[in-house]
Amino acid sequence: MATIVLGRLYRTDVPIAIGCLAALASGALMGALNGACIAYLRLPPIIVTLATMALFRGLAIGITRGEKVSGFPASFVALGQGQIFGGIPAQLPFLVLLAALAWFVLHRTVLGRYIFAIGANKTAARFSGVPVEATKFWLYVTSGTMAALAGVLYVARFNTAKADAAMGAELDVITAALLGGTPITGGEGTLMGTLLALLLLSTLRRGLDMAQVGVEQQAILVGTLLIAAVALGRRHRTP
């Protein structure tokens, strides 16, 4: 949906920088909707996120009617396709900066302790004085904003804004988190583990593409990795 916001605004001659900010704001608003439903209305997170995924994707398809927007400025496309220092992808500084910020927040701030406490035991965290609802709400806002940023970089990489952008990437996201050591029940995990799992998955995907392995076979392999990650995680944590 954020890519569509960017594409539609650019088509109406809105400056690309304003379009990017609007896309990020739309991601924050969509995350806020999820956060409000989950934190304050106390609806099941899995149901809310699946429902809003279908809702936003349907809206994106309805708004565009399947049309794509392309022809973005070269300076913007360079964010997704360009290289710096003779071969380093231009997106890497974004990853390093955001990873460092996330590590600092998770491991060096009170908010980070709140996040781990809520993941481990929401009830205990509430009785310990942790603002559970507010913390969860702002986590979903942040998640929506980061998804929108990923959408902006996706548009820059492929020079195209379309309603079905990154369809199916949800499986890779969940697999990377679980392979990185974050249990399905939450409450623990490391950022470095997640980054290493992301590197493993991206390397695997690139190798399979070079070997001309079909998309269906790749999905089977990622699904198998997901099951293995959950099984190994449960075995590791079972006394």
Image: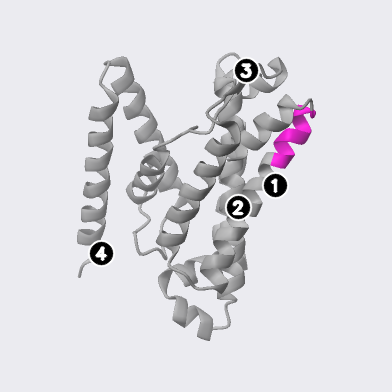
Q: Earlier in the sequence, mark 3 or mark 1?
A: 1
Mark nearest the camera among 4 and 2 is 2
What secondary structure is the magenta-colored segment mainly?
helix
Residue 21 against residue 160 in the figure, above or below: below
Q: Residue at image x 66%, y 46%?
A: 26
Q: Amino acid at mark 4?
A: Arg
Q: Toward the viewer: 144 or 86?
A: 144
Q: Which label's residue is closer to the chain start, 4 or 1? A: 1
Would you name the residue on which mark 3 appears? 85
Mark 1, residue position: 25
State which mark lies toward you, 2 or 3.
Answer: 2
Q: Identify the element where label 3 is drawn.
A: loop
Give, as a single range, the part of the protein colored magenta. 14-22
Q: Nearer the viewer, residue 154 or 53?
A: 53
Residue at 25%, 29% in the rendered image: 216
Q: For mark 2, what is the residue?
A: 30
Q: Are marks 2 and 1 in contact (CB under 8 Å)?
A: no
Residue 184 lies within the magenta run: no
Circle 1: element type: helix
SS state under label 2: helix
